[in-house]
Every structure is written in structure tokens, then in C-alpha cells.
Amino acid sequence: MKKLLMCLCLGLGLIWGSAALAQTAAAPNDAPVANQAAPADAAATAPATAEAAPATTEAAPAASATPTVDKGDVAWMMTATLLVILMVLPGLALFYGGLVRSKNMLSVLMQVMMVFSLVSVLWAVYGYSLAFGGEGLILGNLDKVFLLGVTTASLADTFTEHVKIPELIFIAFQATFAGITCALIVGSFAERIQFSAVLLFSAIWFTFSYLPIAHMVWGPGGYLLGKGALDFAGGTVVHINAAMAGLVGAYMLGKRIGYGREAMPPHSLTLTMVGASLLWVGWFGFNAGSNLESTAGAALAFLNTLLATAAAVLAWSIGEAMHKGKASMLGAASGAVAGLVAITPACGSVGPMGSIVIGLVAGFLCLWGVTGLKKMLGADDSLDVFGVHGVGGIVGALLTGVFAAPALGGTGAEDFSIASQLLVQAEGVVITMVWSSVVAVVAYKIVDMIVGLRVTEEEEREGLDITSHGESAYNR
């Protein structure tokens, strides 16, 4: 607990310092804000745009341009949304499930499925409105609570002026992001947490951490969006955000019984490899779908996702072979996830060669994250959520500020400043780390007081499949 408090204090100091430096060192035009136009402007402008009549002759010609909805864009966004669901169910569920002991396999599958389902419903009830429903530095408003005013005629903005998509598919696409973010946290406290605690924590943390960070980065008027922070598909919003909540949970729940004394190998690396492969496939929807249009921008994100992931697999395997003498299947699968995480914030802003470098760096550093850094932190992060998603997310967020430079093949403006952009990226990283950690501490405390966090020693030894769900993954 002392380590956790020290981390929070350090984070608060860093955020204070980075904010001061940003004000003095970053020029207003240093960040390529145009590349980070919030998809979320959709919500605020859509209904009025959808109902605008061509007969409004009083308006100026430029203002009365008819919004265009392309069937190809709509089809692509529906496909991308399905791909993100594939990432969670069955991708993430099988990846996590194969890594735990057989007596806890079903508990992990159940937690992932239920968290994703719970958050999807909460997103429709109030989450979408608070994240994208109006302008604000930290949150939107409740104008679209219960999706009020959203109809089949409502339109959402894209990155191209006058090109729109149905607001309904934008809502669905963003719901999958919220769902997978909360489901990622499951891996940090696997094999020892009460099922009711998982659900209650997810609801609280989603409300007070995911929604504010999502709005600050992507929402109209959001603080980090206004600063010019680049996060194309969720390096801060999804991965760093979830990783910090997971690390806090690993500390607050304590270590698994026998951790460090008993062998706790994955019960099925075959399923883990299948899960990692499904994650890789689904991630094309996650990253390329964030372009919101079926254009060359989506193609760039698609190619970068492929190349960075492949580079990270190679880097992790090479590093493992150098360190242990052998490259493992678990390492290759983990390397793939590390590359996917790292390229997420950068996929629409860097060039293909930049994506390869990001993948290589992430592969090596995330390998250290689950070995050396994990020992330094002293936390039983069961499935290395922080080592992969935290380290990978930080690497990707920071290197976005480097490789977005046009001189390095990125899409930044001609006056792009690497130093200024790095400062903005670092501020986004620190804000996310501190915000998520503080909310997580409070949320875990509340859950512990209401339902309790951890199962009993007897239940943990028997396995959560039987004690929490009355089932077994494998009948002998």
C-alpha cells in the first residue's frame, strides 16, 4: 500500500509539473489538432444536421451544404464494431481464460462476458451522453441520457466535413470501446475476487474514470483534446486507464494464495494463442474503425496495426530467446498484444516505418514490464495487465508524439514540433494514470465495504468455477 501511495504522490507531482511546462513551452499551433478532431462532435450536432431541410434558402451556401452519408462508410463501421466485439468475446475471454488455472477458467470467461454486457447497457443509459453528449472540459452532459433524441435520422460527424455516419452506429462502436476497457481490468485480479465485486467495481470505475477520460481525450471541448493530445484509438482512454485500475486492484486484493511459492502455469496455451489471434484480427476494427470512414486513413491505420504487431512479436521472442535461451508461445502471444496496444494511439498518425519501430520498442519494453518491472512493483498482477497494457500504452502514447512528425513519415502538420507534442502526450499519460488510480482506490474501498472484495481461502483453493458459478470448465 505504501508503494501505491508513493506512486500516486509521484503522479500528482508529475502532472503539476507537466501542466506548468506545457503552458510555458507549448505554442498553440504545435499540436496537429486537425488530425484529432473529435468523432464525438457527432452527438451534439447530429440531430439538427439530420433535420436540416434543403429549402432553407436564408442560410449561406457554405453553411447549407447537404450532409453526405456513404453506404460504404456505414457498412465499414458496422463491420468494425463487430470486429471489436470479436476482440472481447471470444478473443479477450479466451486469452485470459487460457492463462489461469483450469479451476478458474469459467470464472474469467464469465467475468469478461458480464462486464462487457453490463458496461454496454450503462453506456446506452447514461455513458454515451456523459462522454459525447455535450461540451465540457471533463464531462459532457445528460441531454442524451437513455439516448434521448437519437433516431434513425440522427447523424454523427467524421473526420471529413459534411461526411456523416448514422449516430446509432457511432454509439454502438464507442460502446464496444467502453466494454473492452472495463473487461481488460479482469486480468489483474483473476482467481481471487468475488463475482459481485467485479460487477460493482466495473460500474463505479466506468462512471467516474472511463467516461471522464474518454471525454477529455475525444469529447467536444475535452481538456486533452483542446491541448492537442493525439490518441487515435485509445492508448490513454483504454489501455493506460485500465492498466492503472488493474495495478491498484492487484495491490488492494493482495497476492493469490501460494503466489511466489507454488507453480501457477497457464492451463491452456492453446486457448491463449487462439484468443491472441482473435484479438489481432478484431483489432483491425478497433484501430481502422476509429477513422470512422472507409478511406485511406483507415487503410493507414490498418497497415500500421499489422506491421507494429508483427514487429512486437519478433522483438518479444528475440528478447526472450536472449534472456531465457528459448522463445515461447506465451511470449509470442503476449508480444502480439503488446504491439497492438502500443500502436493503438498512433495508428492514424504515424507512417508504416514508424509503426514498426513502435512495435519493436513495445515488444522489448513490455517483456521487461512483465519480468523486471513486475518484480520491482511487487504486485500479483495475475495476467500482467499493467506490464502489457500499461507499459505498452505509455510507450505508444509517447512515441506517437515522435513519429507523427512529417519528417519521420507521420501525418503531422509542417510546423509539427516533436518536443511540444511529447509534452502534451506526457501530460495525457500522467493525467490518465493519476485519475484512474484515484478513482480505482475509492471504488475498491466502496466495493469492499458493500460486498467484500476477495473470496475466502477455502473458495480460492477450490477454484472460482465451482464456488462462484457452480460449474466446471472441464468434466472428467
Image: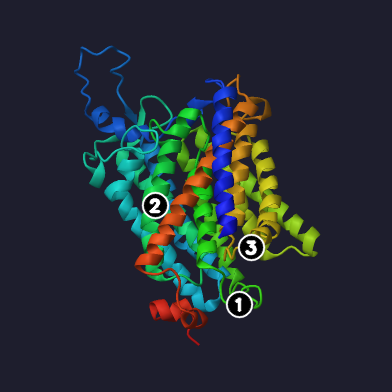
Q: Which residue is mark 1?
A: 258
Q: Is residue 288 above or below residue 276?
A: above
Q: Which dot, 1 or 2, sits closer to the camera? A: 1
Indicate the secondary structure of the residue bearing disc 2. helix
Query: Where residue 280 appears, x then y in whole percent?
Result: 55, 53
Decide: few, some or many residues near mark 1? Use Cα within 10 Å; few <14, some 14-19, many ≥20.
few
Residue 363 visible to the viewer: yes
Which colour assignment does the render follow? rainbow
Q: Residue furthest bottom?
A: 476
Query: Where residue 89 appears, x then y in whole percent?
Result: 44, 61
Q: Quadrant of residue 410?
A: top right
The residue at 53%/52% (across/down) is: 244
Q: Which residue is mark 3?
A: 378
Amino acid type of the residue that numbered disc 3 sits on in the rendered structure:
Gly
Q: Is residue 275 above or below residue 205?
A: below
Is 289 situated left or right of 48 in this image? Answer: right
Q: Which badge, 1 or 2, comes first in the chain's sequence?
A: 2
Q: Which badge, 1 or 3, comes first in the chain's sequence?
A: 1
Residue 348 visible to the viewer: no
Indicate the secondary structure of the residue bearing disc 3. loop
Query: What is the distance, in whole Å, between disc 1 and disc 2 at their CAs?
Result: 31 Å
Amino acid type of the residue that numbered disc 2 sits on in the rendered structure:
Phe
Query: What is the distance, in whole Å, between disc 2 and disc 3 at their CAs?
Result: 26 Å
Query: Where residue 224 appears, x then y in whole percent?
Result: 47, 34
Is 373 situated left or right of 109 in this image? Answer: right
How many discs appear? 3
Decide: few, some or many residues near mark 3? Use Cα within 10 Å; few <14, some 14-19, many ≥20.
few
